Amino acid sequence: MRLTAERCRAEQARQLELSVSDPLVNRRKIAAKAAEAWGKEAARAEKHEAGVPEALSKEDTEIADEFASEALAQKGSHAD
């Protein structure tokens, strides 16, 4: 299940609030990092919701190519 951009932005706002209001310095630092991560996830969710296709990583592309090669090889061996 994907998170919606709205949900991510809400969590980002909550973490930003904690990053300035929490009484403990360590928790403020953690909240700031979490807010940054939620912002990145919100951007990804916005792209997904807009229908922008995600590019595969180099590693995923290599794996997909390997599967395609194996499928072609199997198809060729069953052509008898």
Image: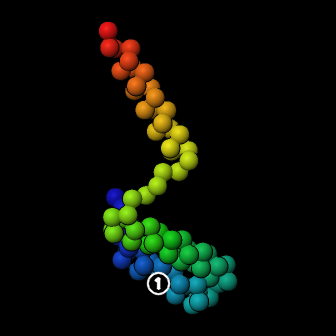
Using the image, determine if residue 62 lies above or below residue 10.
above
In depth, the one of 64 and 22 nearer the eye is: 64
Instruction: Name the residue that disc number 1 marks.
Output: 13
x, y percent for residue 70: 44, 26
Residue situated furthest top in the rendering: 80
Residue at 47% in and 84% down: 13
x, y percent for residue 17: 52, 87
x, y percent for residue 74: 39, 20
Residue at 53% in and 40% down: 62
Residue situated furthest bottom in the rendering: 21
Quarter of the rendering occupied by the C terminus: top left
- Please tell me how crowded label 1 is: few (under 14), some (14-19), or many (20+) other residues with Cα within 10 Å: some
Residue at 51% in and 80% down: 15
x, y percent for residue 3: 37, 66
Residue at disc 1, secondary structure: helix
Question: What is the three-letter code of the residue carrying label 1?
Answer: Ala
Q: Is residue 63 visible?
A: yes
Q: Is residue 16 left or right of residue 79?
A: right
In depth, the one of 28 and 63 nearer the eye is: 63
Quarter of the rendering occupied by the N terminus: bottom left
